[in-house]
Image (cartoon, rainbow, N blue to C red):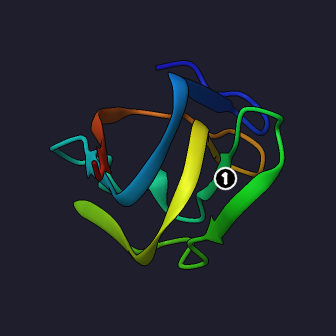
Amino acid sequence: KETESDPWFEINLGAEFLVSKIKLLNTDGSNQNRLSGFVMTIQDRNRVTTSSYSYAERNEVLTVYERNYSTPIVAQFVSFALPGEDRTIDINEIEVYGIE
C-alpha cells in the first residue's frame, strides 16, 4: 500500500443524528499498528466540532476501537486522521450507532 503524510477521510451521515457509539474495526494481519495515533473528530451540519478524540498510543496494536457516549452527541460528519509521515489508512469497517 502507498503511504502519505497526514492521511484522512470523512463520512457524511447525510443528516444530523444523535450518536451514542462509534466502533472502528481494524484490518486483520500484520499491519494492525497502522491505526495507532489516530484522531477522530465529529461535527454537526454546520461543521461545529461536537467531539474530538486522539488515540495517543502510537505503536499499540489496535484490533477494535469503541467510543461510547453516555450523553449522545450531535453528528453529521465523522472524520478520521492519521497524523505523521508515511502513514496508511487501512480499516475494515466503521460503525456509527444512533438513537431514536
Q: Taking the image as drawn, is residue 62 in sight?
A: no
Expressed as whole percent of the image width and height from the top left, the position of residue 64 reads 23, 61
The residue lying at 58 percent from left, 52 percent from top is 74
Question: What element does badge 1 sit on?
Answer: strand
Q: Is residue 16 left or right of residue 20?
A: right
Q: Is residue 66 above or below residue 28?
A: below
* Nearest to the observer: residue 11 or residue 82: 11
Residue 96 visible somewhere in the drawing: yes
Count of numbered tags = 1
Q: Residues within 10 Å of mark 1 (few under 14, many from 20)?
A: some
- Of residues 24 and 37, the one nearer the viewer is 24
Q: Residue at x 41, y 74 (%)?
A: 60
Q: Is residue 31 left or right of residue 89?
A: left
Which residue is pictured at 79% across the width and 35% down the height?
5
Q: Which residue appears farthest toward the left when viewing the image?
A: 28
Residue positioned most to the front: 100
Query: Is residue 79 toward the left or the right of residue 94 in the image?
Result: right
Point out residue 66 in the picture as x, y percentages from the top left corner: 30, 66
Residue assigned mark 1: 41
User: In the image, is 97 to the left or to the right of 14?
Assistant: left
Which residue is found at the position 32% from the left and 64% from the top? 65
Residue 23 image position (x, y, % from top left): 29, 54
* Residue type at tag 1: Thr
Q: Position of residue 11 (x, y in %)?
A: 53, 26
